[in-house]
Every structure is written in C-alpha cells, then in structure tokens.
Image (tube, rainbow, N blue to C red):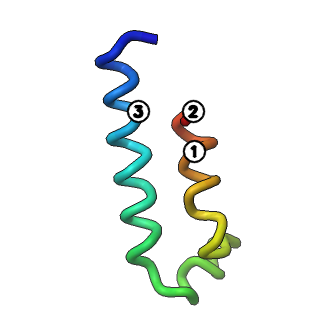
C-alpha cells in the first residue's frame, strides 16, 4: 500500500471515529453499536 493511500485510510478512520464519537448513546444503540466498539468498527472499515 502506498503512502498516499495509507494516509487517506488514516484520515477516513479518524473521521469515522470522530463522527461516531459525537453521536449520542441512544443513536449508537439504535445502530447496534456500543461506544467501546467505535475504534474497532472504524479499524475494520479502513484496514488499520
């Protein structure tokens, strides 16, 4: 994987963590996500 792609994936990972982190516990629960799972979900989505 080249540097630009790695950096882009890292940015997407951080954005996903940030967006999910701003959601209320109720919104996360509606999506079936526990707050403690946010980083794992983002990591799985962007291959970190």
- Image location of residue 24, percent across then percent down: 47, 86
Label annotation for residue 43: 1
Using the image, tell me which numbered label, if any, was put on residue 9.
3
| Label 1, label 2: how far apart the Cα atoms are | 5 Å
**Is residue 24 found left or right of 7 in the rendered image?**
right
Mark positioned earlier in the residue sequence (1 or 3)? 3
How far apart are labels 3 and 2 at the CA level? 8 Å
Sequence order check: which comes first, mark 3 or mark 2? Answer: 3
Q: Residue at x 46, y 67 (%)?
A: 20
Residue found 38% across the figure and 42% down from its top: 12
Asked if the residue at tag 2 contacts the one at tag 1, i.e. Cβ–Cβ closer than 8 Å, the answer is: yes
| Gap in angstroms between the C-alphas marked 1 and 3 | 9 Å
Which quadrant: the C terminus? Answer: top right
The image's mark for residue 24 is none
Q: Is residue 10 left or right of residue 24?
A: left
Q: Quadrant of residue 36?
A: bottom right
Residue 47 place in picture, x, y as percent: 57, 33
Q: Nearer the viewer, residue 29 or 18?
A: 18
Relative to 23, say whether 20 is above or below: above
Residue sitting at x 54%, y 50%? 42
Secondary structure at badge 1 equals helix
Q: Are marks 3 and 2 in contact (CB under 8 Å)?
A: yes
Residue 47, compared with residue 42, is above or below; it is above
Q: Residue furthest left?
A: 4
Identify the image quadrant of residue 32.
bottom right
- The residue pinned by badge 2 equals 47
Q: Position of residue 4 (x, y in %)?
A: 29, 18
Using the image, determine if residue 32 lies above or below residue 8.
Answer: below
Secondary structure beneath label 2 = loop
């Amino acid at each position: 994987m080249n540097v630009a792609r790695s950096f882009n994936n890292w940015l997407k990972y951080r954005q996903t963590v940030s967006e999910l982190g701003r959601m209320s516990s109720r919104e996360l629960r509606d999506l079936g996500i526990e707050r403690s799972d946010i980083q794992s979900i983002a990591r799985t989505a962007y291959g970190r």
